[in-house]
Image (tube, coloured by chain):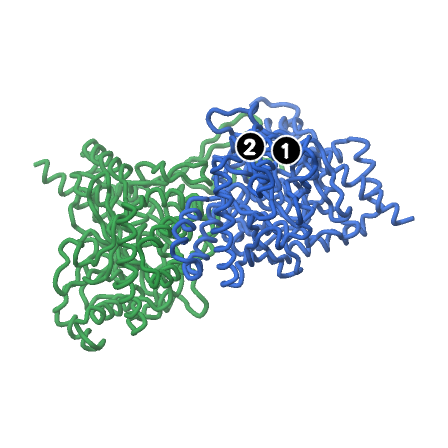
Chain colours: A blue, B green
Amino acid sequence: MKTTPLHRLLAEDLKVINIGVPSFAETLTAVRAPHVHVHWTPPAGGHVAAVDLLDRLEAYAEVIESANKEALARVLASRPVVIDVQPARKVVPGMEGRMLLHAGPPVTWDKMCGPMRGAVIGAVLFEGWASTPQEAESLVSSGAVRLEPNHHHSAVGPMAGITSPSMPVFVVENQEAGNRAYANMNEGLGKVLRFGANSPEVLQRLAWMRDVLGPALGAALRAVGGIDLKAITARALQMGDECHNRNTAATSLFVRTLFPVLVKVVPSDRLVEIADFLSRNDHFFLNLSMAACKVTMDSARGIEASSVVVAMARNGTEFGIQLSGTGDRWFTAPAPEVEALYFPGYGPGDAARDLGDSCITETMGIGGFAMAAAPAIVQFVGGSVADALNFTSEMRSITLGEEKTFGIPNLNFAGTPTGIDARLVVETGIQPVINTGVAHREPGVGQIGAGIVRAPMACFVGGLRALAERLSQNAR
Amino acid sequence: MKTTPLHRLLAEDLKVINIGVPSFAETLTAVRAPHVHVHWTPPAGGHVAAVDLLDRLEAYAEVIESANKEALARVLASRPVVIDVQPARKVVPGMEGRMLLHAGPPVTWDKMCGPMRGAVIGAVLFEGWASTPQEAESLVSSGAVRLEPNHHHSAVGPMAGITSPSMPVFVVENQEAGNRAYANMNEGLGKVLRFGANSPEVLQRLAWMRDVLGPALGAALRAVGGIDLKAITARALQMGDECHNRNTAATSLFVRTLFPVLVKVVPSDRLVEIADFLSRNDHFFLNLSMAACKVTMDSARGIEASSVVVAMARNGTEFGIQLSGTGDRWFTAPAPEVEALYFPGYGPGDAARDLGDSCITETMGIGGFAMAAAPAIVQFVGGSVADALNFTSEMRSITLGEEKTFGIPNLNFAGTPTGIDARLVVETGIQPVINTGVAHREPGVGQIGAGIVRAPMACFVGGLRALAERLSQNAR
């Protein structure tokens, strides 16, 4: 090591604080000069409009913070319990006539992505509103089938997320706030409606789920008086799941809990098929996880002035978010492409854009936000174990608190980062991280990979702009 | 920071290597002097007899290494599959007449610890050889009941480990080497035979396991043609189990795999009780894990000159090990006390000494050796998450290879440290780490805590001494 002026300064007891530009600190490290490096970037990446927006909101800081505190408290207090399975038309509010629910913010038939179109056609056939795919397509394009977001009906669905009136849905109740949410049931992998497949085998499975699986699980859940989903999620997060793209532990715990009661209430001639189906599908818990997160985030809706994100969802065309303090408005941006690990034989050119309501899990602080709990998932979504740990710690910069019930062993049992504040997203420039499956852009091919995607910044800027307008109007 | 002679030396481009004593390096760190610290301790902690022993073995280094390579290869190639459940008397080799098998190395009735005595009495009552505990005790102390280690009969059992002729045992086959191993079935927690309880409720449960659970699981396993235990263990290690004191994931996966076939083969009037029992007992997989490890380590037995440890086991009085190259001899030391977290109301004064065959899991490289896979276990056995990671990396210093099938996500999917070489234990002074349940020293109270224990060094020194004698005799 050469003696440099820096070494002499060091010997003279110099103390260095380096702010911002990391390359200065790297030089100090290289010559072993003692220093402290402070990470700093200009707010909102220095974008003038965003800085201005944050400034405008600063005038309402106190009211926003108090609203956000209330929102976070409601999220943390939530007690999601799955209590029943019923046909959607019987329980989902506002589900009537020829209506199909879809994932993400509102989208019209002409703008829908391939897999969602395929799933819509499949659902029309499943409901018997048409008898061929061609007939189904003309029916839908004629406007005779109402298409609305799941989120407008207290519901969620993965990928295309199509929910039709006779599909069985889980009924999840937030036993703290009393609200309910709904999710259809997971079909497994391969050719499935949620990836846009609509062949006879797909429709047959849906019919079996409607006639056999749904009624059986409903009876079992009623017999046990419901199953606490927060408790299962908490255990699963200690067992390598993050409850979005890894649900092996949660599914196993759920099935093991239901096993004795299924055996009691289900006729033995049906039990074998049901056991077989539940035994094979490691993702079965996903839809329950989504409904638990939905019922939790819905309880934090409608708090005037709150900048907490209560929904993030994608329809394959647009990515949309909703804030607690801006009612039912969506703030959208084009759906991003996913940074993915592809299954053999597929690549980025085959991929649909980001799709599905499943990022309600990240909205609630699990999934990508809890990846530190699930390091094995990097084999599926890509990246290293260190990345998985980093995602969770990075998300602490944009969240208001932590869900201590969801203690992550790898982080000395620190809770999951919970309650996304849109202001923090814009201020830090850190976009919420989502891990997700990737659908083929053609209907019916199925899942072709999985990876990581970030919620688009424009959604948060849009949301904050609307919040600022609303606050200034109310103040007048 | 003051300018010291050390700072001046630093400015003059001094390079420092510090060997051994860490406090010198700490001083260098404190003044930020660049240095490399090399961990070093004298071999065998400088104990002359042990150094001498290692020297004697050095003459046979080549033959030992080749034998150990073969032992490790057999361990890694093992394919344990549970294929059946049968009464012990029908399948366990050499199990005949009034014989009971117990945990650990050989021990006579008069030297047995409290929980083991209680379990022996319970097993005598269960078999109908006596009708009161007093009668049972005089029968055993008269020598009319043969007491032999499980390990002498290709078997293992947790805690007291008592296996009696009519108990149902899992039949686990190593489908690579063709050998078989056996383990009784886990009774759950609370008042159970393995902790020395022998009340009517304990014996009733054992009768139910003999008459209902055992035959049902046997029929189910025969119907599916066996279940691959290595595959379940590999998945469970990615789900927070280390498959000794955490078996929640493995149990859930096992039950979920068996669910469809149980439903097929078991009469529906019995199915409810079985489902209920399997649904409640998170430790059910433990005995399967033990049998899988036993069948694996047995396939590495009897390799002349090998210093690989093929068994570690405790009877509550003594801790014993066996080496591949020294036949069926045991090398024993007093059973250590466990460094434990106690359940409320209990403390070290209540504890039995280290007990059970369950450390066959550590012998095979899981359990304490795989604690990095199961950080949540520190809530049960004590210590920090960092300790859990450290145990696994520390064990690499005394093992010959790694089981890549058991990739640990937290360690970037590095395999578990496998194949304990007794030479490395003595040379490094690093004793194998075991995590374990703690029994009350009085029979029948049950589990009072869990913690960490180290295999006594004297066992390894004893084993190596015998190996050295055998090698020098053979060389003559």
Give the image location of residue B129, x and y in percent.
16, 71
Q: Is residue B101 above or below residue B126?
A: above
Amino acid found under the numbered disc labelled 1: Gly
Look at label 2 and name its amino acid.
Ala
The chain to which mark 2 is attached is A
Percent coordinates x, y for residue A268 in the rendering: 38, 57
Dividing the picture into quarters, in which one does residue A311 lie?
top right
- At horizontal 77% and vertical 37% (from top left) the residue drawn is A462
Residue A211: horizontal and vertical position, in percent?
A: 49, 51
The label on residue A439 is 2
Residue A113 percent across, percent down from the top left: 63, 31
Q: Is disc 2 placed on a helix, strand or loop?
A: strand
Tell me: residue A45, above or below residue A154.
above
- For label 1, the residue is A316
**Residue in the foreground of this view, choosing between B210 and B344:** B210
Labels 1 & 2 near each other (Cβ < 8 A): yes
